Image: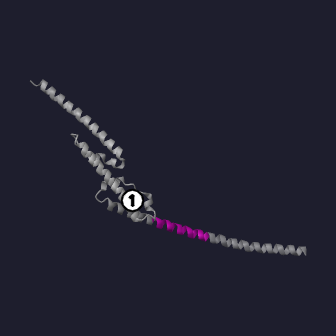
Amino acid sequence: LEKGIAEVRKKAEKDSKMEIEAFIGKLKEAEKEIKLLSGDIDVQVKSFEEKERKNKYIEINELIDSKFINHEDLKDFLNLSIKWTNKTYSKTMIDEELEVQFKELSKKKEFITDKLKEVNETLVTTLLFQEFKYLIGFDYPTIISTIDSKKNERIRIETMLKQKAEENINKAIATDP
């Protein structure tokens, strides 16, 4: 009886191992197929996302162009946000942020222009906006101190040139009989 039970047990163990190995083989085959399919799907998804991202960049650039159509010089100072390329970030949200930046950049440009007009009233040679355009990217105290510094430098140079000219005139008068 003991021998018979052992034989039945061994046969059951052998049969079940064969069934399990066949089942495991089928699962491994299914894994390989799924891995191939998911690789293909991953490539397609990445390609689709890249296309969407490119379309979003085009959309963002169109918004920028429309907002800054008469102010090309301000475009260089835009802070382009990476979040604008997110799928959840709408065109309206981007437009609102661009509007805020546009207003701030325009305000700084006007501030610099006004400050230069004020400074140029005291100078013989005028300071040009192009020289100070880069200041749009800075804060107001920096803008003021930079322009004032340049003004003081110009005043010093102009004063020095005026004195030299007067000295030359005086020398010419002194040497002229």
Residue 148, picture quadrant = top left
Tell me where residue 65 sits by quadrant. Answer: bottom left
Residue 49 position in % (x across, y down): 47, 65
Where is residue 63 drawn, in percent x and y? 35, 62
Most foreground residue, 111 or 162: 111
Which is the main secondary structure of the residues drawn in magenta? helix
Pointer 1 local density, CA inside 10 Å: few below 14, some 14–19, many at least 20: some
Question: Does residue 6 lie above or below 166 as drawn?
Answer: below
At label 1, the amino acid type is Glu
**Does 139 sit above or below residue 26?**
above
Q: Is residue 127 magenta?
A: no
The residue carrying mark 1 is 97
Identity of the residue drawn at 17% across and 29% down: 168
As rendered, which of 7 and 131 lies closer to the eye? 131
Q: Residue furthest left?
A: 177
Magenta stretch bounds? 32-50
Q: Residue at x 73, y 74 (%)?
A: 19
Percent across and percent down for residue 174 are: 13, 24
Colour style of the rendered protein structure: one colour
- State which quarter of the image contains the C terminus: top left
The front one of 127 and 92 is 92
Q: Number of callouts in the render? A: 1
Pick out the residue farthest to the right: 1
Identified at 40% across, 62% down, the residue is 94
Q: Secondary structure at mark 1?
A: helix
Q: Position of residue 10 (x, y in %)?
A: 82, 72
Q: Is residue 161 above or below residue 95?
A: above
123 shown above or below 174: below
Residue 35 magenta-drawn? Answer: yes
Give the position of the N terminus as an image quadrant. bottom right
